[in-house]
Image: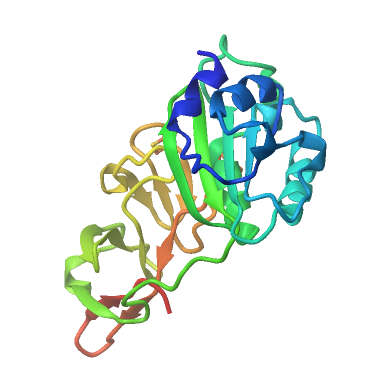
C-alpha cells in the first residue's frame, strides 16, 4: 500500500487552503487536485490563510516527532483541519518504514486531545496504516451533559462486576473495582472491541483482543503506556438506596 492511495478518503472541500507536509507530499498535493494556488508550500504552512494541514508519513519520518508535532499544532490557526496519514505503530514487523520511529495512532489521538483539538475521528484504522482527522477547536458541549441517569444498583455489581448501560446514546460500562464504582466507555480505545468481554482486575481492565490494559479509575493506559486514554464518566452512588447514577460529564 502506498500512502498516497489513501487520499481519496480525505474530505477536502474545495476553496480550503491546505499545506501538505511529509515524505509523500508531492504525491498527495497532486492527488488532492486543489489547484496550485490552494496548496501552500510546506515551508509556508504558518499562514493566516491556512485552513488545513495534511501530514503524510511525516511523524514516523521525523526524529523528534513529538516536538515537531507540538510546533505544528501551536501554529495551526483556530478551526483549521488536521489530517494525519501514518503507518501503524503495531502492524506486522515486515511492513512500513523504520519501525523504531513509527508514531502510534493512540498516542497521536491522545496528544491532539490534550492540545485542545476536537472532532477527532479515525476513518481508517487498518493494522498497517491509519488516518486521523481533527479540528483545532475545543469540543462543543455535549447535549444532556451533567444530567445524572440511574443505570444500576450496588446489589447488581459485586467486586469486579461489570454492567453494560446506555446513557443518552453513549454505550458505557459501570464497574465495581472493589474500592469504588466507575463508568467508562464500552469501546476499547485501541480498536473498538467491547471491553465488556475483557477482564476486570481491581482497577485494571484488560481488553480481550490484544490484551492492552487501562486504569479505569483515571482512564490512563497501563500497557502499552503510550496508548490513548479510556473515556470515563462521572458516577454518583446513593448510599441509602444503592442506586448508581451516571452522567456524560459534569
Ligand atoms: S482492541 Fe486492541 S487492545 Fe483492545
So how many labels did they put on this image? 0
Is residue 168 depicted above or below 122 in this figure?
below
Relative side of 184 to 130, left or right: left
Q: Which residue is depicted at the point 82% across and 37% down?
A: 43
Is residue 192 depicted above or below 49 in this figure?
above
Give coordinates of residue 245: x percent, y percent.
27, 78
Q: Nearer the viewer, residue 125 or 207?
A: 125
Quadrant placement of the C terminus: bottom left
Relative side of 149 to 215, left or right: left
Examine the image and state in which quarter residue 164 appears: bottom left
Examine the image and state in which quarter residue 235 appears: bottom left
Q: Which residue is depicted at the point 26% across and 43% down?
A: 197
Q: Which of 66 and 47 is in front in this view?
A: 47
Relative side of 121 to 168, left or right: right
Q: Which residue is depicted at the point 55% across and 47% down?
A: 109
Q: Is residue 225 visible?
A: no
Q: Which of 107 and 81 is in front in this view?
A: 81
Give coordinates of residue 229: x percent, y percent.
51, 53
Q: Is residue 214 visible?
A: yes
Is residue 2 depicted above or below 37 in this figure?
above
Give coordinates of residue 84: x percent, y percent.
59, 37
The residue at the far bottom in this view is: 240
Q: Quadrant of ligand 1?
A: top left
Relative side of 60 to 176, left or right: right
Q: How is the model colour-coded?
A: rainbow
Give coordinates of residue 212: x percent, y percent.
46, 39
Q: Which residue is depicted at the point 61% across and 22% down?
A: 30
Amino acid at each position: 500500500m502506498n500512502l498516497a492511495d489513501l487520499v481519496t478518503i480525505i474530505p477536502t472541500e474545495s476553496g480550503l487552503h491546505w499545506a501538505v507536509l511529509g515524505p509523500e507530499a508531492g504525491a498527495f498535493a497532486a492527488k488532492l487536485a486543489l489547484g496550485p494556488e490552494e496548496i501552500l508550500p510546506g515551508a509556508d504552512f504558518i499562514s493566516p490563510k491556512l485552513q488545513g494541514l495534511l501530514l503524510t508519513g511525516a511523524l514516523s519520518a521525523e526524529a523528534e516527532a513529538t516536538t515537531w508535532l507540538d510546533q505544528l499544532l501551536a501554529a495551526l490557526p483556530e478551526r483549521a483541519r488536521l489530517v494525519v496519514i501514518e503507518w501503524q505503530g503495531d502492524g506486522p514487523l515486515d511492513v512500513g518504514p523504520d519501525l523504531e520511529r513509527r508514531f502510534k495512532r493512540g498516542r497521536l489521538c491522545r496528544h491532539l486531545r490534550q492540545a485542545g483539538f476536537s472532532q477527532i475521528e479515525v476513518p481508517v484504522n487498518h493494522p498497517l496504516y491509519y488516518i486521523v482527522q481533527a479540528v483545532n477547536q475545543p469540543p462543543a458541549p455535549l447535549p444532556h451533559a451533567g444530567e445524572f441517569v440511574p443505570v444500576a444498583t450496588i446489589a447488581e455489581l459485586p467486586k469486579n462486576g461489570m454492567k453494560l448501560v446506555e446513557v443518552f446514546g453513549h454505550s458505557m460500562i459501570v464497574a465495581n473495582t472493589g474500592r469504588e464504582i466507575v463508568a467508562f466507555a464500552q469501546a476499547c480505545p485501541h480498536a473498538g472491541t467491547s471491553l465488556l468481554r475483557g477482564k476486570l482486575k481491581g482497577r485494571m481492565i484488560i481488553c480481550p483482543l490484544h490484551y492492552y490494559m487501562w486504569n479505569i479509575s483515571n482512564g490512563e493506559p497501563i500497557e502499552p503506556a503510550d496508548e490513548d486514554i479510556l473515556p470515563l464518566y462521572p458516577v454518583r452512588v446513593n448510599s441509602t438506596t444503592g442506586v448508581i447514577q451516571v452522567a456524560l460529564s459534569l
